[in-house]
Amino acid sequence: MPVLLLDRDGVINHDSADFIKSADEFVPIDGSVAAIVRAHELGWQVFVATNQSGLGRKLFDEFTLAQMHEKLITLVEEAGGEISGIAFCPHLPDAGCECRKPRVGLLTEIERNFGVVLEGEPFVGDSLRDLETAIAFGCQPILVRTGKGKETEARLISEPTLLGALKVPVYDNLASFVATLN
């Protein structure tokens, strides 16, 4: 069964410079829940890999993060889809952990905990660190223009060697990428 990896903030839900700190602030981007459902209907296992430094910053606790993820899972399930798993990094950017993207610990955790192979699978993100994680793990990096995606795309255009010679496919949003899956 193929695997679809997704970043969370800016890909599935609206992002905020002030962080998403509660289930009420967790607001899906138009079409993202339906896109996850569609991927599931097509036979894809969907996993989320997300940096959540708001935990390390003490902006919210693990219970609140679980409420946010439960909201996402419920929205997807009520629409007929499934999220197979969520992995998150709770650390601050300077913690030096192995799980914070662009390091690959979250993907290693997903492989280990769910018995899937992620090499070659698409990883949809909106930031440079998402793309770097995908490349470092051997996944197919996909950029969406939601969240920080437009800024990331502009940076890739202005610095064409940023990711080496690799040309990253760019889509308007998660739904437009999922529409290409079969």
Image: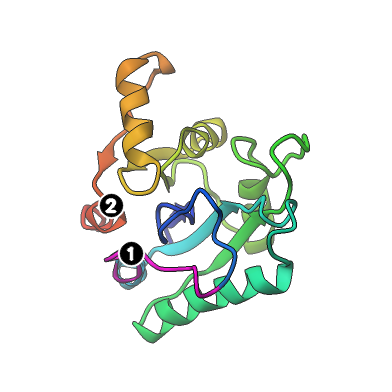
Q: In the displayed image of the protein, which residue is found farthest to the bottom?
A: 78
- Residue at position x 37%, y 70% in the image: 40
- The residue pinned by badge 1 equals 32
Marker disc for residue 173: 2
Q: Is residue 24 magenta?
A: yes
Q: Are marks 1 and 2 in contact (CB under 8 Å)?
A: yes
* Magenta-tinted stretch: 23-34
Circle 1 residues within 10 Å: few <14, some 14–19, many ≥20 = some
Q: Horizontal placement of 103 versus 132: left or right?
A: right
Q: Residue 10 in the image: x percent, y percent?
A: 42, 52
Circle 2 residues within 10 Å: few <14, some 14–19, many ≥20 = many
**Amino acid identity at mark 1:** Ser
Q: Residue 45 in the image: x percent, y percent?
A: 45, 64
Predominant SS of the magenta segment: loop
Query: Which corner quadrant holds the C terminus?
Result: bottom left
- Residue at position x 59%, y 64% in the image: 21
Label 2: element kind: loop
Marker disc for residue 94: none
Distance from disc 1 to disc 2, alpha carbons, whole Å, reads 8 Å
Which picture quadrant has residue 69?
Answer: bottom right
